C-alpha cells in the first residue's frame, strides 16, 4: 500500500483530504509565546486578529522529526510519499528526510520537494493520490510527479501589503505607496521561490478579475482535470465571479475552491486570491 501524506501548507479542504485519503502533517504557528498547529487549533481569522493587535507577523515552523515519524510505521512494508512546501521556504522537506533516515525507512519513504506552496502542492498531492488508487507503486508515482512538478502554475494577487511588510517581504515605503495607490501585486511561484510579476490597480472585484483574465491563454493550455481557486478570506461575490469566468472557458472538469491555512495566510494576509492549475 502507498500512503500519500503532505504537510499542512497544501491547503486542501477536509472534503478533498477525505476523498483522496490523504494524511496531513501540521506545521506550527506561533503567536507570541503561544504555539498552535496549522489546521488543528488555529484559524486564519484568529491569526489576523492577533497580528493586527500586535502589529507583528506570526512565526511559523516546520513539523519536527518526532511529529513526522508518527505517520510512518517502521514495522510495515507499506510505502510512503510525503509532499512538503518548497525547501527554500521551510525546513519541512529536510525534517521529513531526516525522519525517514532516523527510522531506517529510506527505501520505503519518498519525500518530494514540491517546489511550491498552497494548492500548488495540493495539485501534486491529488495527482499522486489518484495514481495510488490505481495501484501504482511509489516509484511510479514519484516519476510521474517529477514530470509535472515544473508544469504547476501557482500565483496569487494580494489585497493588502501590510502582512508582506510585517513579514519583511516588502519595505515600509512600498507598503505605504501600494496602499495609497491601491496597488495589488501578483506573486508567482517559480523554481521553488516567490517573486512579483505584475501590479494591478483598483479595488475589489476589478483587480481580481484583471488578474484572472490575464491568465486566459495559460488557462486554455491547462490540464482539464481541475483548477483551484484558493483564497484567504475573499468576499463570496468575488469568488463566485472567478468561478463563473472559469466555467465560461469550458475547460475544467472540476473548479475547486479552498481556503488558505494559517501558515500561508500569515504571510499573504486576508483578501488574497489565487488561481492554480497544471499546464499541459
Image (spheres, rainbow, N blue to C red):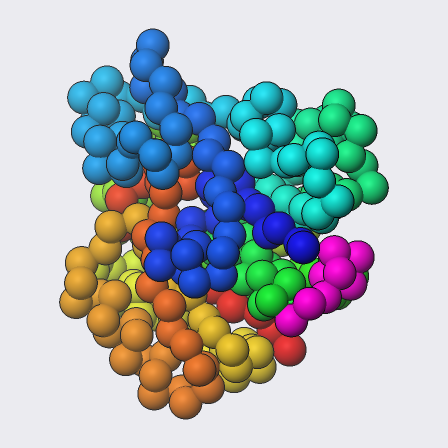
Image side of residue 112 versus residue 243, left or right = right
Q: Nearer the viewer, residue 46 or 210?
A: 46
Residue 60 is left or right of residue 173, and the answer is right
| Residue found at x 35% / y 24% | 36
Residue range (magenta) = 134-141
Q: Image height check: is 88 above or below 184?
A: above
Labels in figure, total: 0
Indicate left or right for 19 with 86 as reference.
left
**Looking at this rendering, what residue extends furthest in the front direction?**
75
Q: Is residue 187 above or below residue 50?
A: below
Vertical placement of 210 versus 204: above or below? Answer: below
Residue appearing at x 49%, y 42% in the figure:
24
In percent of width and height, residue 41 lies at 30, 30
Coordinates of residue 133 in the picture (x, y in percent): 60, 67
Q: Is residue 164 magenta?
A: no
- Kindly identify the residue that appears in the image at 64 percent across and 78 percent down: 280
Image coordinates of residue 119 in percent, x first then y, are 48, 55
Q: Quadrant of residue 231?
A: bottom left
Which residue is pictured at 23% across the width and 55% down the height? 234
Say if residue 88 shows up in the picture.
no
Q: Position of residue 143 (x, y in %)?
A: 78, 61
Residue 125: in sight, yes or no? yes
> Toward the viewer: 195 or 28?
28
Q: Quadrant of the N terminus?
A: bottom right
Q: Determine the residue located farthest toward the top in the rendered image.
A: 33
- Locate residue 102 relative to residue 238 in the image: left or right: right
Q: Nearer the viewer, residue 60 or 73?
A: 73
Residue 139 shown in magenta: yes
Locate residue 223: give its quadrant: bottom right
Q: Quadrant of residue 237?
A: bottom left
Amino acid at each position: 500500500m502507498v500512503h500519500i501524506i503532505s504537510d499542512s501548507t497544501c491547503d486542501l479542504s477536509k472534503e478533498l483530504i477525505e476523498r483522496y485519503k490523504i494524511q496531513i502533517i501540521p506545521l506550527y504557528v506561533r503567536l507570541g509565546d503561544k504555539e498552535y498547529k496549522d489546521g488543528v487549533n488555529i484559524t486564519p481569522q484568529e491569526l489576523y486578529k492577533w497580528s493586527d493587535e500586535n502589529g507583528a507577523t506570526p512565526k511559523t515552523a516546520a513539523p519536527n522529526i518526532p511529529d513526522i515519524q508518527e505517520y510512518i510505521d517502521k514495522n510495515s512494508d507499506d510505502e510512503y510519499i510525503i509532499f512538503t512546501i518548497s525547501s527554500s521556504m521551510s525546513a519541512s522537506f529536510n525534517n521529513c528526510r531526516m525522519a525517514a533516515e532516523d527510522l531506517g525507512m529510506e527505501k520505503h519513504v519518498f519525500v518530494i520537494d514540491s517546489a511550491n506552496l498552497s494548492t500548488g502542492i495540493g495539485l501534486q498531492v491529488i495527482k499522486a493520490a489518484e495514481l495510488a488508487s490505481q495501484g501504482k507503486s511509489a516509484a511510479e508515482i514519484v516519476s510521474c510527479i517529477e514530470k509535472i512538478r515544473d508544469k504547476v502554475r501557482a500565483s496569487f494577487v494580494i489585497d493588502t501589503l501590510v502582512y508582506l511588510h510585517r513579514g519583511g517581504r516588502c519595505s515600509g515605503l512600498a507598503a505605504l505607496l501600494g496602499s495609497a495607490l491601491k496597488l495589488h501585486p501578483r506573486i508567482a511561484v517559480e523554481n521553488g521561490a516567490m517573486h512579483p510579476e505584475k501590479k494591478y490597480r483598483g479595488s475589489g472585484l476589478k483587480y481580481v478579475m484583471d488578474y484572472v483574465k490575464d491568465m486566459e491563454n495559460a488557462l486554455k493550455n491547462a490540464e482539464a482535470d481541475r483548477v483551484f481557486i484558493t483564497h484567504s478570506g475573499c468576499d463570496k461575490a468575488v469568488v463566485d465571479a472567478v468561478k463563473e469566468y472559469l466555467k465560461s472557458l469550458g475547460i475544467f472538469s472540476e473548479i475547486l475552491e479552498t481556503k488558505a491555512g494559517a501558515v500561508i495566510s500569515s504571510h499573504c494576509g486576508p483578501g488574497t486570491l489565487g488561481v492554480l492549475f497544471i499546464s499541459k
